[in-house]
Image (cartoon, grey):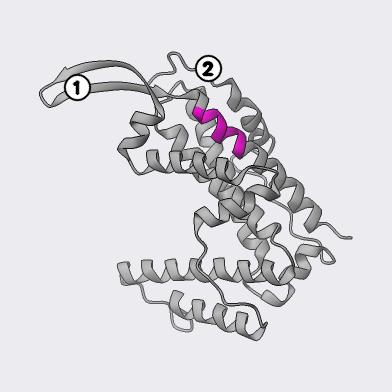
Amino acid sequence: MSTHGFNGSYLMPLFDLVVQSREDGYYRPLPRPEASSSLATDDAPLGEWPASGLICTSYSAGLAHVDALRRLTEAGQIDATSPWTLLRGALENFATGIWLLDAPGRTERRRRTLSLWAEDMRNRAQHEHDTGHTPDPGGASGTERRQEIRDLAVALNLPALTAPRTSLILEQAAPAAALDPVAVRASWRAASGFAHGRHWTLVRISQPRGAAKTDNGHLLALVLDENEHRKLTEHCHTMLRHFNARYFARASAR
């Protein structure tokens, strides 16, 4: 790993935003919604399944992903893969917050919230199954919690809950942040290719700097394609700024 030939100045505006949210050993959490705010009104009938809870955890996770890349950059440990995978996580986190905050109308915002909670509990149930975990007496399993959420949606007369798809979240969040959903999706696909070790991204979205012959062929030396990575960075920066603005607007009393 090396920062040889790496400029990365385009990352600085995004890094600056994260540093402003960083305290000694933790990231400053978003404040709780004020009681008379629009967001608190959304949350009121949702009980222990509020939108604000999902929004705040998505925000903190996104900051952590970006900050990890900042620390790697400062340490001079830039490779051709990690910058993509870390900002992929951040992009998904920031888009999720926007998707929950900017849904058209309170009914849809509540439906999206409970859909995401239901998916969260489904994933929890899968982990419980894999690990053989049994809830403590008086507790509930992920499957039982998921059913509680589905029952709440019915009681609130919400449209049917659907498992959120990341690509759809990105496509629906992008216009709210004044971004082109196709461009955002393209950057996310590239980042996902790196995260999953796909071959096409190595060929299409990396810059070869050398090659060495091996017993099995040739070993390519690849470096980060800054032109393509800049696009992903700018999407993350724009979404984080919009995320912050929308949260404080909707979580403040009116």
What type is the residue that disc 2 sits on?
A: Asn
Label number found at residue 243? none
Magenta part mainly helix, strand or loop? helix
Residue at the disc numbered 1:
218
Name of the residue lying farthest toward the left: 215
Quadrant position of the N terminus in the picture: top left
Q: Is residue 183 above or below residue 228?
A: below
Q: Is residue 49 visible?
A: yes
Say what secondary structure mark 1 lies in: strand
> What's the distance in space between the residues labelled 1 and 2, CA to CA?
27 Å
What type is the residue that disc 1 sits on?
A: His
Q: Does the magenta stretch include residue 62?
A: no
Mark 1 touches mark 2? (CB < 8 Å) = no
Q: Around disc 2, counting alpha carbons within 10 Å, would you say few (fewer than 14), some (14 to 19), or many (20 or more)? A: few
Q: What residue range appears in magenta?
A: 228-235
Q: Quadrant for residue 12, please give it.
A: top right
Question: Horizontal placement of 217 versus 185: left or right?
Answer: left
Query: Picture coordinates of residue 65 (x, y %)?
Result: 52, 41
Question: Horizontal placement of 214 versus 21: left or right?
Answer: left
Q: Which residue is drawn at 42% across and 43% down?
A: 192
Residue at the disc numbered 2:
7
